[in-house]
Amino acid sequence: MNTHYIYFDNQEVLPDYFVKILRFIPSTQMVFVLSNSIKPKKLRNKANLKFIKLSDLEYHNKFAEFKKVYRHLSTNPELFELACFERYFALNACMTKYKINSAWHLDTDVIPTAKLSAYLNLDLVFSNPYQDLSAVSAHTAKFSKIGIASFVDYLLNNFYQENSNQLAGVYHDRKSKNLLGGVTDMTAIAYWLKTLKPNSWHNSYGSEVLGIRINHTFADLENEIFSTADYPHKKFLLLRLTKKVIKLRTLDKDLKYGSFHFQGHYKNLLPFFLYGKLFFGSAEFFLFMVLAIAKIKKEFNRF
């Protein structure tokens, strides 16, 4: 049986790129969409997509408790950071209500494929590109029911209470260096993972399970697969999208991915990739495309 996908989006209307991703996911894959929105007409015939109103999940009292201990230590808006934390409370409530023992938590800008099944025997999967374990991403994260319950409990009772001074130091250090962000849900995951037993979770960054990788971010793709010594081969990437897997080829590498993450402005590439199923170019070319599309959209919106 496939591990369920669970997406969280607290907006009233789903982003168009997210709707396209949901249409792409095969009907054999069960997907839970935790959202304030209703199921769009374009998705009405997809019975595998179960839309659940946030008000129908029993997590709001616990989340209200968390907001009492929350400290805003980020350059991002407080509502944005709180929404990032809220998804874990909603995920925990959903897995409890529907008796789900294991699930993929996916950001709404992640394209998943069937080959995520390669990670079937792993309970906890996250993406950490930092050697100091300072921030761990859950953009394509696998949670066991025990794991998500443990993390929610840690957020309620330990994260800010036990690390207040250190977290404040992290934030002020970033501000002094004119860096954006600060203490986020990714910080909390990193601190929580440090409390678990060694080797109790899998870091998907730059690694493979049964020959399948999980992309951290599209913008960071070259750094994931190339070392400095590989630099002459960093120019050309060929990407092919199928429902089963995403294939990536370079001059000397042939890789397979279970998912791709189009974070930030790279969301502009999502419709083109989903429609054309094929990308070819360098990281510089993809960045040019992102900037060009953003510029065109900005000019179009002026009129």
Image (tube, rainbow, N blue to C red):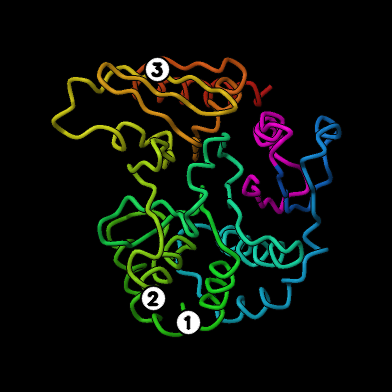
Q: Residue 181's x, y, as percent?
A: 42, 57
Q: Are marks 3 and 2 in contact (CB under 8 Å)?
A: no
Left or right, residue 192 beside residue 90:
left
Residue 99 or 58: which is nearer the viewer? 99
Q: Quadrant of residue 130?
A: bottom left
Q: Earlier in the sequence, mark 3 or mark 1?
A: 1
Magenta region: which residues? 1-29
Residue 214, percent from left and from top: 44, 40
Q: Residues within 10 Å of mark 1 (few under 14, many from 20)?
A: some
| Mark positioned earlier in the residue sequence (1 or 2) | 1
State the residue position of label 2: 195
In this view, the residue in front, 225 or 294, is 225
Q: Secondary structure at mark 2?
A: loop
Mark 3 to mark 1: distance in Å?
Answer: 45 Å
Secondary structure found at label 3 = strand
Q: Quadrant of the C terminus?
A: top right
Q: Nearer the viewer, residue 10 or 52?
A: 52
- 240 sits left or right of 200 in the view: right
Task: Specify whether residue 281 is painted magenta.
Answer: no
Among all residues in the image, which is located at the extreme left?
A: 229
* Residue 24 falls inside the magenta stretch: yes
Query: Distance of mark 3 from mark 2, alpha carbons?
Result: 40 Å
Mark number for residue 158? Answer: 1
Q: Residue at x 32, y 50 (%)?
A: 129
Residue that mark 3 sits on: 238
Mark 1 touches mark 2? (CB < 8 Å): yes
Between label 3 and label 1, give the one nearer the viewer.
3
Q: Is residue 195 above or below residue 293?
A: below
Residue 87, horizontal then vertical, whole percent: 63, 60
Amino acid residing under circle 1 = Asn
The residue at the point 46 percent across, 54 percent down is 125
Up-down relation of residue 181 to residue 145 (above or below): above
